[in-house]
Image (tube, rainbow, N blue to C red):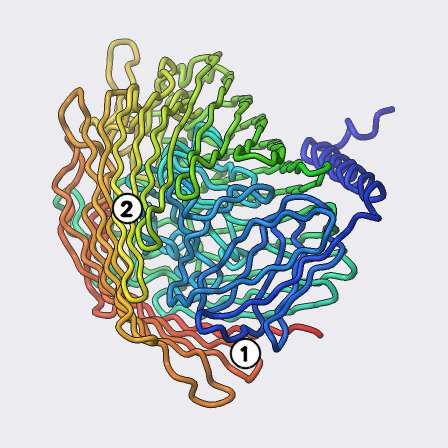
Amino acid sequence: MNLINQKPTWVRKAVILLALFTALCGLAFFPQKASAQAVQSIKGQVQDVQGQPLIGASVHLQETLQGTQTDVQGRFQLNQVRPGHYWLQVSMVGYATLTKSVTVAQEPVSVSLTLQPSNQQLQEVVVQSHGAQLNQQESSVLTQTADETYINQNAGASLMGTLEKLPGVSAINMGVGISKPVIRGLSFNRVLVTDSGIKQEGQQWGSDHGLEIDQFNVEQVEIVKGSASLMHGSDALGGVVRISHPVAVQEGHYTASVRGIYRSNNDTYGTTVATAGNHRGLTFRVRATHLRYADYKVPAETFTYNRFVLPIYDGRLKNTAGRENHFSGTVGVNKNWGYTHLTVSNYNQQVGIFSGAMGIPRAYMLTPDGSRRNIAFPSQDINHFKIISNSNIQLGKNWLEADLGYQRNHRKELSAPHAHGAPSEDSNHLATQLDLQTATANIRYFPHFSGKLEPTFGLQAQAQKNRQAGFEFLLPHFKSQQVGFFALSKYRLHKKWIANGGLRVDYGHLSAEEEQRTFYYENRYLATIQQSPRVNRDFWGWSGSLGVACNPTERWGLKANFGKTFRIPAAAELTANGMHHGTFRYEQGDATLKPEQGYQLDVAVSYDNERLQLSVTPFFNLFQNYIYLSPSGIFPTVNIDGSLYPVAEAGQLYRFRQTRALHTGAEATAKYFLLQTLTFGLTAEYVWAQNRTTQLPLPFTPPFALQADAEYNLPRLTTYLQNGYFKVNYGYYAAQHRVERNELETDAYSLVSLTTGIHLGQQKWGQLGFQVQNLLNGKYLNHLSRYRILNLPEPGRNYVVSLSIDLETP
């Protein structure tokens, strides 16, 4: 009897993935013996621009994740390094991260490295993958990296709330705990999120669906602006939010950390604890996070919906409280042949949804229920489970990288049936359940040539299965498969000219079952109707890009990248047909939609000297068959025997449509170092999007934004108080009057925030941080917020206090 086949689906897939992980471990240990006699060392010294040694700088090899720190003379040595091609990365707080290519042959390698000072926590380093890197000067694609320091200093209520201050990055949000990424005005299935090399798969097509990722478990995030389809697939047409796999602690070291956080606006109390270690290359990492928050405050006493003025009691939005419990654990092996890691994580969030967002707001639904932390109906219960295997194995002078993953996104939306037309005697509160399971395999091969050519070959495959339930309908049962093959290359045309390019072919298949549903009107059964037709579609497409990066002088940089892109329609775009109450609308897909096709041009010009950094990054995108969600201006109805019946409390009907579209804009940044301790920054960004068929703007386009900030690094106060900083940020967001027909406009507004913090202890074992967000308690409508449809302002003033304690042995 086959015992495995009797187990649940996720157990079988977990067993299969564990078997693959074990096989990779075995494959990795095999070549270790073959070259045990050929190991060498990499040694060197790290210094600053004045030639002074830097003590405690982190040095590690990207391919093997083996690392060390510099000693009191700034020296380091990595032993037992096998012959091959590596990328050596050096980082230290207060300095720009340095990445250097190193080739190990038959002799020890010696290097001298100089770090440039930097007050920025945003490092412009491109990590294409663990096996092949390009630094920012060599890449034709614009990428910025937010490191752990930046993430801690700018921590918002969610990961995207933390990152949306970056130029060209914004977030679609619903309340304080749910947000999703927008890059240059593109979002949903055009912006891909990867976690440790695996595409995050949830219900990313929904604006009320956030990223199911614990932001406290993120050490580094890379934002790719512009098309990254070649490496990541068709959904990366607009960009990528790439969460890096954590670097293991040094061999023989063990760490433990605890962080507490408090946010005043919604009375958040949160704690995250973590520990990690490395015993002779055997590594582990564990983290657990708990958050609990109450209804959040807004600077308003009323809001207006359809000319009805409704109350906001005590300045809080009823039923926006929530709680989160997250866990992540990693075990692995780091050796000189590479590494292999296995990560298991679980993200759980239970959050209330403001009652007025689930149907027509009524005054009796808005009265206080006696508890600010109570989660009543309507609400969401989201659980995201993942198993990820990451391996990078040396094969001679070449590298084979494999990322394998299984994830299950289980979402429940709970509500009272009688509030949405279903019979009141129905005691089942499950409005919508979406159960999405995804298996992913990403394989990349990096052959090393001695010439100017550095190629990469890859295969990506994915299989999905979605099951739905509940008394409401949004998506049918469906299955999908995708596979893509790509070849990328970097070619050194000249010492100062680097060319990048590649080709990719993708195939996708989607099959969805026909769905029949009973239709109720005023609690009466009327008929059984077809809610969604049977769909069986195949999609083929190709994408390609060609770019160049040039650094004519040490001060100036120029890059340009032109690409042809292709995107497979998402399941929701093809099959959705139902109330989506979290976004206060009825969404209707189109099973005949064609794949998107586009041509994208990205350009970047930069200037950098000791005091001034400037950059201008324009972009131009021309799309054919652009898929967008269009507000119709009407309410949905059902035709039964020639009579039209309205769908209960469905909101406005939004249809997925296709058109020719033009999408362009730019970001401009300036940073001036007045003193070594005082820095001024300015960022401007603008997106212009046009429907070329109707000549109307595209919906959900962010307005022009301008941000100015000043940062002062405090001198060392005492032995136990050091590395203090104080930062003031001013943001201006213009009115958005360029909206599609039936889309609401928003007025201009300004925001001021303060951030300060300091390290504690001689060994910097602790860090105390303090923020004031929306300092002036301004009342404003965010154009990308789902609650603006109800004329609900964003959260008011928010004080954030955090305390971190980090310990390390030896």
Q: Position of residue 126 (x, y in %)?
A: 46, 47
* Type of amino acid at the residue the image marks with label 2: Val
Left or right placement of residue 675 versus residue 62 in this view: left
Give the residue pinned by disc 2: 605
Q: Residues within 10 Å of mark 1 (few under 14, many from 20)?
A: some
Please give the name of the residue rendered at 24% of the width and 14% of the height, measured from the top-left corner: 643
Q: Position of residue 705 (x, y in %)?
A: 21, 52
Badges 2 and 1: C-beta atoms under 8 Å apart?
no
Find residue 246 and report its image quarter: bottom right
Which image quadrant: the N terminus? top right
Residue at the extreme top of the image, as rendered: 641
- State the residue in front, 113 or 99: 113
Q: Secondary structure at mark 1?
A: loop
Query: What label does residue 764 carry, if any?
Result: 1
Which image quadrant: the C terminus? bottom right
* Type of amino acid at the residue the image marks with label 1: Lys
Q: Position of residue 52 (x, y in %)?
A: 50, 75
Q: Position of residue 701 (x, y in %)?
A: 23, 39
Residue at the extreme bottom of the image, as rendered: 718
Establish if 760 lies above or below 680: below
Q: Secondary structure at mark 2?
A: strand
- State the residue in front, 325 or 638: 325
Do we see residue 644 in this rendering?
A: yes
- In the rendered picture of this protein, how many numbered marks are placed on residues? 2
- Between the residue at mark 2 and the residue at mark 1, the CA separation in whole angstroms equals 38 Å
Left or right placement of residue 471 versus residue 161 in this view: right
Of the numbered discs 2 and 1, the one sitting upstream in the chain is 2
Establish if 428 lies above or below 767: above
Please give the name of the residue rendered at 70% of the width and 46% of the height, measured from the top-left corner: 105
Query: What label does residue 284 carry, if any?
Result: none
